[in-house]
Amino acid sequence: MTCKEKLKKCKEEGTALLATNFYNFETLKGLLLAAQKTKSSLILQTSESTLHYLGIKPAKALADSMLKEYGVQGWLHLDHGSSVELVKECLNAGFDSVMIDASERPFSENIKITKEVVEIAQKYNANVEAELGYVAKLGQKQSLEPTSAVEAKTFVEETGVNALAVAIGNAHGFYKEKPYLNFERLKEISAVTNCCLVLHGSSGIPDDQLQKAISLGISKINLATETKNIFMKTLQSVLKDNREIDLRKVFPVAIDAVNTLITGKLEVINTVRHA
Ligand code: 13P
Ligand code: ZN
């Protein structure tokens, strides 16, 4: 089943896929152990900076071989792609899904570039995600203005995009105060489009709000910061008074921490079904 088909199925069933970013072999291993244990499918995501770090082809080869090794159904996705060139490179390398993020451009330009990517992705049968509205990136100020339902309807109709990231009180990175998602707006957006809706910035969103968001039409939950944080915090604490130089003895503790974190998230996400 392709990523596009799976997300469509999730949308119809009222379920969601966890889409988690990985950065290296160790974080990927932690994610896959969790998916294997909970018998979950998942989307593995790489941001542009991870692709600069790993390389596009090595990232693809690593994701493929690890999914096979752990017997997990999963797909590889470009997270927050900023250019058509990068999208093309990822599609040529065999990515199952790409995001073109032109959310900071004017509405008409966002439509134009997204439409171009949808056309390109067609021959690869790849899933295409775009973003409409302002989901603050790391270091940016959070916006209180949610995605407009009227604009979302027009955007999906004009671009033919499969998945749409929406701004409903979410932001990337840890929240300074407890977040409260705008469920009213999510309902309004869900009512006017059948497109798969995506929640970015899920780190720090309480479990009950994640579950409610899924029950109101979110079918892809993007999580990154919590994984990075637990991996590095665990390593820092292990290495604090430790002079071990055999990295194979140190990394497993951090891999386990990622496994535990993601197992918990998958359990939260997997319990949701539409009433
Ligand atoms: P967090 O880093 O806030 O979990 O957001 C992840 C994300 O949206 C990736 O696209
Ligand atoms: Zn994001």
Image (cartoon, rainbow, N blue to C red):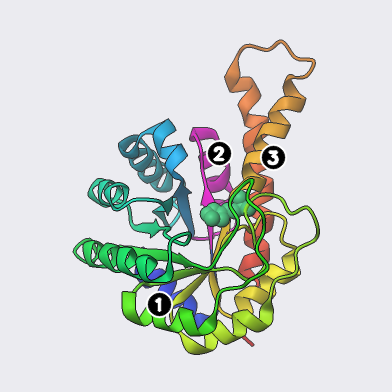
Residue 19: within the magenta? yes
x, y percent for residue 90:
30, 48
Q: Quadrant of residue 123?
A: bottom left
Residue 22: within the magenta? yes
Q: Circle 3 — which element?
A: helix
- Drawn side of residue 14 relative to residue 5, left or right: right
- Drawn side of residue 266 relative to residue 19, left or right: right
x, y percent for residue 271:
65, 71
Give the distance between the C-alpha atoms of the residues marked 1 and 2, in whole angstroms: 35 Å
The residue type indicated by label 3 comes to Ile
Q: Are marks 2 and 3 in contact (CB under 8 Å)?
A: no
Q: Which residue is mark 2?
A: 27
x, y percent for residue 159:
32, 74
Q: Nearer the viewer, residue 1 or 241?
A: 241
Query: In the displayed structure, would residue 258 be above or below residue 266?
Result: above
Q: Which mark is residue 155?
A: 1
For label 2, the crowd category at 10 Å Cα-Cα, with few meaning under 14, some 14 to 19 and many 20 or more, is many
Q: Residue at x 65, y 36 (%)?
A: 231
